[in-house]
Amino acid sequence: MVVAATTVAAPLPAAAAAAPERVTLSPTADPSTSQTVTWRTPDDGAPVLEIAPTGATERIRRIEGKRTGEASGVYYRATADGLEPASQYRYRVGGAGGDWHTFTTAADSADPFTFLYFGDVQNDITRGAAPTVKAALADTPDARLALHAGDLVNQGSDDDEWDEWYGAFAPATAAINQVAAPGNHEYSGSQLSPHWPLQFPGAGNGPDNKDLDHTAYYTDYQNVRFIVLNASYTNAPWFSYADWLGDQERWLRGVLDDNPNRWTVVTFHQPLFANRPGRDNEPLRRYWLDVFEDYNVDLVLQGHDHSYGRGNLVANRTDDPAVQTGPVYVVAVTGPKMYDVSDTNWVRNGAEARVQRADTQTYQAITVDGERMDYTASTADGEVVDAFTITKGAGGKHVTDVSTPRH
């Protein structure tokens, strides 16, 4: 954990440390009053975060962080707390040699905001995936949070691939909250990439299972509870996936029982209903599907199958073919690696795929505004692949298709 913060009258004097890189803004449980920053230097540097309200340099705080480990460089982490909600801050890390970045804390009320959702980036990142990422960031400059549904890279311990990933998302990693779930490619066997906890520490409020540290947690952002789960049960260590998934199920029910927010968004990697022919993640449905349905979770955002798919349980159809109730299950891919699509696994398990699309890289922009959530999946050139709206009011919850092209 981060140690004490002190207020200083001016920035620190110039330091000899190497310039920080991979600066990443991660949400705490309450990102309206606190934020965590991670970064890396090639060699030992200063574990220091300097932060102040934008335009108030006389109020700079110097926060001593900690050295968290090494992975092709030295990583650090610091958490700034006692922040004002809905306020812009300016910060730098590593002493006077670092660049200044800005971010805005979450509001402590249900103010409207937009977040982005990315499926697997994974392969050929600079040439193949980055154009879609850059289009998302350019088309949604007011996005406040980026959600990643696993397989951010192809080999989780390959530092060059992480260089490409940060190059694709820069400078957004330092400016908006990054909410990331690990995929199977962030593992080697049962070992999580050493890069993962150093870059994506999580909010520290996950299940009581050390093997799930940094990979399952939740954060509350302006009337939305974002929940990250670790669905990579095939990478579970020696004690079996039953504990891996069961511990998360029990924790998840508690997190949903005690949810004061109007909206709930869950993300993890392997999908409950496989979009790729021949796949089936039955253990995920066995442990988690009833939880999502019992608590009427709004969005379940997944990856892994390298295609686009969106659907729901058949039991949640209404008399209007364009309207459903209950949770929405989505699979998406941002990178260029592609698989075929099939609705066989959906149908066999009581669900329907309302929209499916192969060979299509997308990003998703979701806007939350009071009783309404608007979802749009787009390609880099602006084609709308899917769109729907969720409303919650006196008449209950309804998911209404805005466009449902079937491919």
Image (spheres, helix red, strand yellow):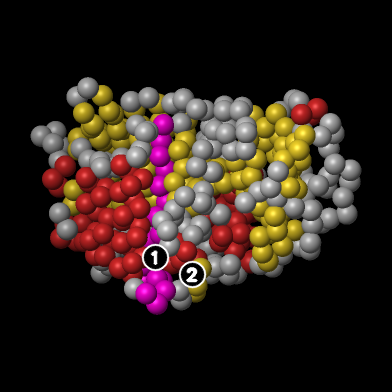
Residue type at numbered disc 2: Tyr
Mark yes or no: residue 241 visible: yes
Residue type at numbered disc 1: Ser
Query: Residue 295, located in which quarter of the rendered image?
Result: top left
Tag shown at residue 232: 1
Q: Residue furthest top?
A: 394
Please tell me whether residue 74 is drawn above or below residue 292 in the rendered image.
below
SS at mark 1?
A: loop
Task: Out of 51 and 354, give the one closest to the viewer.
Answer: 51
Residue found at x 70% / y 43%: 4
Task: Out of 50 and 121, give the one closest to the viewer.
Answer: 50
Query: Residue 268, located in which quarter of the rendered image?
Result: bottom left
How far is the residue under mark 1 from the one under mark 2? Answer: 9 Å
Mark yes or no: residue 337 visible: no
Q: Position of residue 18 (x, y in %)?
A: 82, 56
In the rendered structure, the answer to whether residue 204 lies left or right of residue 394 reads right
Mark 1 or mark 2: whose residue is earlier in sequence:
2
Please tell me whether residue 213 is drawn above or below residue 91 in the rendered image.
below
Q: Mark 1 and 2 residues: CB-CB less than 8 Å, in contact?
A: yes
SS at mark 2?
A: strand
In magenta, the rendered stretch is 223-239
Label 2: which residue? 187
Local crowd size for mark 2, using a 10 Å CA cut-off: few (<14), some (14–19), many (≥20): many
Q: Position of residue 356 (x, y in %)?
A: 29, 51
In the rendered structure, the answer to whether residue 95 lies left or right of residue 33 reads right
Q: Quick check: is 236 in the magenta stretch?
A: yes
Q: Position of residue 13 (x, y in %)?
A: 89, 43
Q: Quick check: is 251 in the magenta stretch?
A: no
